[in-house]
Amino acid sequence: MDVVKLFSLLLLFRFALANGDASNRKHYVVYMGEHSYKDSESVITANHEMLTSVMGSHEGAQGAAVHHYTKTFRGFSAMLTLDQARELQVSDSVVSVFESKTNHIHTTHSWDFLGISNLEKSHQALMDSTSDTIIGVIDSGVWPESKSFNDYGLGPVPAKFKGVCSTGENFTLSNCNRKIVGARFYYKGFIAESGPLESFNETFFLSARDADGHGTHTASTIAGSVVPDISLYGIGKGTARGGAPGSRLAIYKACWFDFCSDADILSAIDDAVSDGVDVISMSLGPDPPQPIYFSDAISIGSFHAFQKGVVVSASAGNSFLPGTVANVAPWILTVAASTMDREIQTNIYLGNSQIIKGFSINPFQMNNFYSLVAGSAAAALGVSSENASFCKSNTLDPALVKGKIVVCTLEIILDHRNEKAAAVKQAGGVGIILVDPLAKDIGFQFEIPGALISIQEAEKLQAHMVSQQNPVARISRTMAVLPTKPAPEMAMFSSAGPNVISPDLIKPDITAPGVNVLAAWSPSATANTAGRSIDYNIISGTSMSCPHVSAIAAIVKSVHPSWSPAAIKSAIMTTATTQDNVRSFIRRHPNGTQTSPFDYGSGHVNPAAAVDPGLVYDFDSSDIIGFLCSTGASPAQLKNLTGETTYCRNTKTSSYDFNYPSIGISNLKGNISVHRTVTYYGEGPAVYKAEVDSPAGVYVSVTPNKLSFKKMGEKMSFMINFTPYKTSEENFVFGALTWTDGMHVVRSPIGLNILSLRSV
C-alpha cells in the first residue's frame, strides 16, 4: 500500500474511532468571525476546548476536527451530528454553523482580442509594476514544469508575501520560484464529505500538483509567462501568455476531481488573505440555487477578503438558464463567458462537395471518404432506434457500423460526449458526428475523428443522407479561423441573471473570453483529452473567463495600488463595452438572439479603458452592511457574515441606493429617485455630462446632469429619477446611464421591473 493511500485510510480511521458510527455525522463549518487571539495555536486550542464540550473528550474533539480557521477569521470544521451542531450554534462565541457543501469547478489569442498588447505598449512603465502583484488561485493546483510558469526576468518575490511552498507528493520546494511564489493544498474537507481520494479511481497527487488540468489552465491564463510558438496539435498557434505575465502566482489547491469542499475553500481563502495576495481568482462555485450570503462559505470568506483590500473574482457558472448565476454577492466580481473572434472549426466534407460546418478538436487527418450511418439506423438487437441514436455503449450493431462514420445525438445536454465516441469505436466505427446545441461553444476531443454540429447543420446533413443512396463524408482536421464576426457573443452555457438573492443587484458583473481558450495544461490530465498527454489545451467555461478578469484586476491594482476592491471592480465594469466587432449589440451565441445585462452584466471587459476609468463608484464594508439591512437582513444574519454583533440603522436606505456601478430596481412602483456617488480620478479639472438611454416605459432624468470636478479624489453625488408611464409586465427592461467628459466613457447598465405607475 502506498503512503498516500495509507495516510488517507488512517485519517478516516481516526474519524471512526473518535466518532463511533459516523453514518449520522456530517461535515459542518463552525464560523466565529474575527478574533483577537495572539496566534494560530491559541485559536486551535480554543477550538478544541469548544469541540470537547460537545464531543465529551479532548481526544474526540481532536478526532472530529477537520479544519481550523485561524488567520483572517476564527472557526473550524468538524464531523458532527445534527444535535452537536445545534449545541454549538447556541454558544455565545459562535456566529453560525452550516453544513459544508460541495462546489463544482465552473490563450494564445484571447489577450490579443482584448487589446492587452496595445495596453502594454502605451503603459509599459505601469505594466512593469504588475511584478509586485500576487494573484491567489483557488483551484485544482498547478503543473509547475509548464513553460508558462518560468520565472525568467522576474525579480525577487515581493516582501509582502508571507505564504509558503508546501511540499507533498511530486512537489518539492524547487517547484516554487519567482513566478509560483507559494503553494498550498487542502483535502481534509473533501475526504470527510466524499470519501478517500483513492475511491475515485483517478490520478491524483496529494500536493499542490495538478492532475486535473483545470488549475494549470486558469493560473496560466491569469499570469502565465510569455511562451512563443504554442498550439494544440497545430490549432490556435501563437504566443501563449497570461494577461499579467509579470504578476506572481500563489496556488491554493482546494479542488479534487472537479469538486471543491466549502470547508477547504474557506481554509484556502483564510490562508490567501493572510499570505498577502492582492487578488483571489476562483473559477468555481455552487450549483444553483445560490445559497444566501450568510450560509455560503464563498460569500463569507470573500467578504473578509474584501475587508482586507483583496479583490475576489469568481465565475458566474455554466448553468445555461436565467436565474442561475452563481457567486452573486456584491463584494465579488462575477464573470460571465463570451466568445472571441476565433473559431475552432472541424468541417465535414460530403461526397457531393457540400461542406457541413462542424466544431471540435480533431487532430486526425481523414484522407478518405467513408459511408455515413445514423445511430438510429444502426441499433443493436433489442435496442430501440431512439436509444441507438444516443450512441451509448452496446446500443450499436457492429455489422451496421463497422468502417462508417456514425451520426449521433444527445439525450440530455449533460451527456458524456467522449463515451459516445468510445461506443462508436467499440462497434467498429471510424468517426463520429454528434448533433449538439453547444457545438460551437465547447471543443471536445474524441479518440476517433469527430465533429460536433449544430441543429441547423444537422438538418442539412440529414437532407443529404436521405437524398443519397450511399452518402459518404470525410471529417477534416481542426483548424483555427480568425478573425470571425460578430464577436464577442455570449456563450450559450454561461449562467444568467436575474440575481435570485438580491434582485436589485444586476449579476453577472462583466463578461470575458471563455470559449475555446488555449492555455497550459497538466500532462497527467488525460480524461478529457481522449487519453492523450498534452501540455496546452483548449477548453471552455466561465472558469476560463474568470481568470481573464482576475488578470485585469491585477493590472488595475498595480496601476492604482491604493484603490479599494470596489473601486477596481467599478473601473472594470463601467469601462466595458456592449458592442461587438461589427458595432452591433452583443448577441447570444450561436443563434444570434438578443441579450441583456442579465447575460453580460456591464458588458465585455476592456483592459485598456479599465486602467483609466475617469470616475469610480466606490463602497466599503459599512455600505455593504447598509445594503444588506435594506434587503431585510437580521442582526443574527449580519453577525454570520461579519462575525460581530451588527445592528441596522433605524433609517434604512433603499437597496437600489447601494453605490454599485450598475443600477437595478426589481419592483419599481411609481416615481423613484436613485442615489449614486462618484469619485474623480484624473489630472486637473474636468466636466462630465450625463447621457441616458431610457428603458422602455419610463422617463429618466439625472440631477444634476453635469458634474464639475476640480481635483483628483473629489466626490460628487447625483440622482437618477425614474417616472414610469408603462408597466413592464413582470419583465425587466434595460437602458443605461453614461457619464462622459469627451474622453472617458463611464457607463452603468439600468435594469427595471416596472410593476405599477403609482406608489402603493
Image: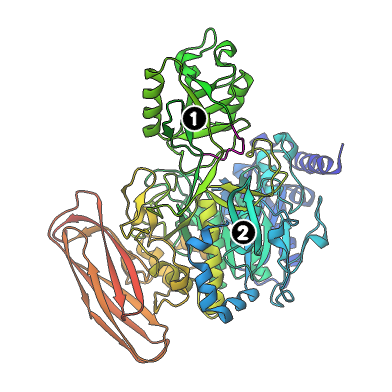
Picture layout, residue 698 above or below residue 527: below
Q: Is residue 333 left or right of residue 30?
A: left
Q: For the N terminus, which image quadrant?
A: top right
Residue at 63%, 20% (x, y): give it. 426
Identify the main secondary structure in magenta: loop
Could one spot residue 288 in this view of the protein?
Answer: yes
- Residue 87 part of the magenta-drawn span: no
| Residue situated in front as seen by the camera: 346 or 92 | 346
Picture layout, residue 497 above or below residue 458: below
- Are the residues tagged 1 and 2 within 8 Å (C-beta)? no
Residue 596 on image: x %, y %:
32, 54
Picture layout, residue 667 above or below residue 622: above
Residue 5 on image: x %, y %:
81, 40
Among all residues in the image, which is located at the extreme top?
381
Where does label 2 land, which residue? Answer: 240
Residue 61 on image: x %, y %:
74, 50
Picture layout, residue 438 above or below residue 571: above
Where does label 1 land, which residue? Answer: 434
Residue 624 on image: x %, y %:
43, 68
Q: Residues within 10 Å of mark 1 (few under 14, many from 20)?
A: many
Residue at 65%, 35% (x, y): give it. 530
User: Which secondary structure, mark 1?
Assistant: strand
Task: Name which residue type carries label 2.
Answer: Ala
Task: Name which residue type carries label 1.
Answer: Leu
Q: CA distance from mark 1 to mark 2?
A: 30 Å
Q: For the C terminus, which image quadrant?
A: bottom left
**Which residues are the magenta region?**
360-366
